[in-house]
Image: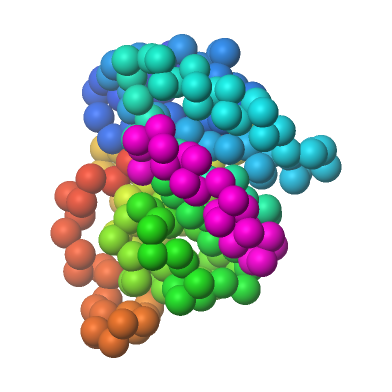
């Protein structure tokens, strides 16, 4: 998902390939003009607040949801407020905000954080957003994909990891690094190669798929065998 990025190439990809969407939050709402050909999901901007060491703005988040409720284009899902890398605080935020966010009528994503296991995910979560620290995320991503039907992975900034998520059956990913050098940098060619279905020769040699058990008991097979047409979405960011 091209989060926060309204570059012309994003619209071009959406029209040509179809599996591109936006991910953005309250801080980018004004510059991301909604378009019917570009689906979007709505973030809470907790990561931006954490990264900038500022207080998360509850009012801005709900003001933005109120604005989107009046728009004819609705988000595919909304991220419930979370606290980056903090398991207990994120669970507290879910208890505090989930019902209020769900009252808008859109699916609500639960962000998993460092230290969580599949058993920590609330039963009323509509999908899983894999957040947390980078090291923890890539150590556990196979387990989240194995145990949940709808999984989004945040901050995916290499083409090998895009393909890893694809092979694990992840529904969508986002990344903020792809556009940092403008619209004509070589990284964008790698992303377009993914949209075309052109796999780099050695991508999965670097990140091999593993077998992970389901928490409810059932077996789990190597995700390299999963159908490649599962409706993946690339959600990119600035």
Colour mode? Answer: rainbow
The image position of residue 161, as x and y in percent, is 46, 56
- Answer whether residue 164 is visible to the viewer in this image: yes
Work out whether residue 132 can be spotted: no
Residue at 54% x, 61% y is 112
Q: Is residue 50 above or below residue 224?
A: above
Residue 105 screen position, x and y as percent: 35, 35
Q: Could you tell me residue 84's position as x and y percent? A: 68, 54
Instruction: Work out whether 62 lies above or below 223.
Output: above
Q: Which residues are magenta?
A: 85-107
Report the residue at 28% width, 35% height from top.
Answer: 19
Left/right of residue 196 with respect to residue 184 in the rendered view: left
Residue lying at 52% horizontally and 30% vertically, measured from the top left: 24
Is 103 covered by the magenta stretch? yes
The residue nearer to you, when weighing 184 against 110, is 110
Asked which quadrant contains residue 104, the reply is: top left
Q: Position of residue 108 (x, y in %)?
A: 42, 46
Q: Which residue appears at 25% of the width and 29% of the height? A: 18
Taking the image as shown, residue 175 lies to the left or right of residue 11, namely right
Quarter of the figure that contains the C terminus: top right
Which quadrant does the N terminus fall into?
A: top left
Residue ranking furthest to the right: 53
Q: Nearer the viewer, residue 9 or 155?
A: 155
Q: Is 213 or 69 nearer to us in this picture?
A: 69
User: Looking at the magenta stretch, what is its main secondary structure?
Assistant: helix
């Amino acid at each position: 998902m091209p989060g926060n990025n309204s570059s012309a190439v994003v619209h071009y990809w959406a029209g040509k390939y179809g599996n591109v969407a936006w991910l953005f939050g309250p801080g980018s709402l004004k510059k991301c003009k909604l378009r019917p050909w570009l689906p979007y999901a709505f973030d809470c901007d907790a990561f931006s607040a954490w990264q900038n060491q500022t207080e998360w703005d509850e009012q801005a988040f709900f003001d933005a949801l109120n604005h989107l409720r009046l728009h004819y284009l609705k988000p595919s899902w909304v991220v419930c407020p979370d606290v980056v890398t903090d398991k207990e605080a994120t669970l507290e935020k879910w208890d505090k905000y989930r019902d209020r966010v769900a009252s808008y009528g859109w699916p609500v994503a639960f962000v998993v954080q460092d230290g969580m296991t599949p058993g920590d995910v609330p039963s009323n979560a509509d999908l899983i957003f894999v957040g947390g620290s980078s090291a923890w995320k890539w150590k556990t991503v196979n387990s989240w994909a194995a145990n949940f039907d709808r999984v989004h992975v945040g901050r995916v900034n290499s083409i090998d990891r895009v393909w890893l998520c694809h092979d694990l059956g992840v529904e969508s990913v986002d990344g903020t690094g792809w556009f940092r050098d403008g619209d004509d940098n070589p990284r964008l060619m790698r992303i377009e190669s993914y949209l075309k279905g052109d796999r780099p020769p050695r991508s999965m040699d670097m990140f091999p798929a593993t077998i992970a058990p389901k928490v409810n008991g059932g077996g789990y097979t190597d995700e390299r065998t999963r159908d490649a047409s599962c409706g993946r979405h690339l959600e990119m960011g600035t």
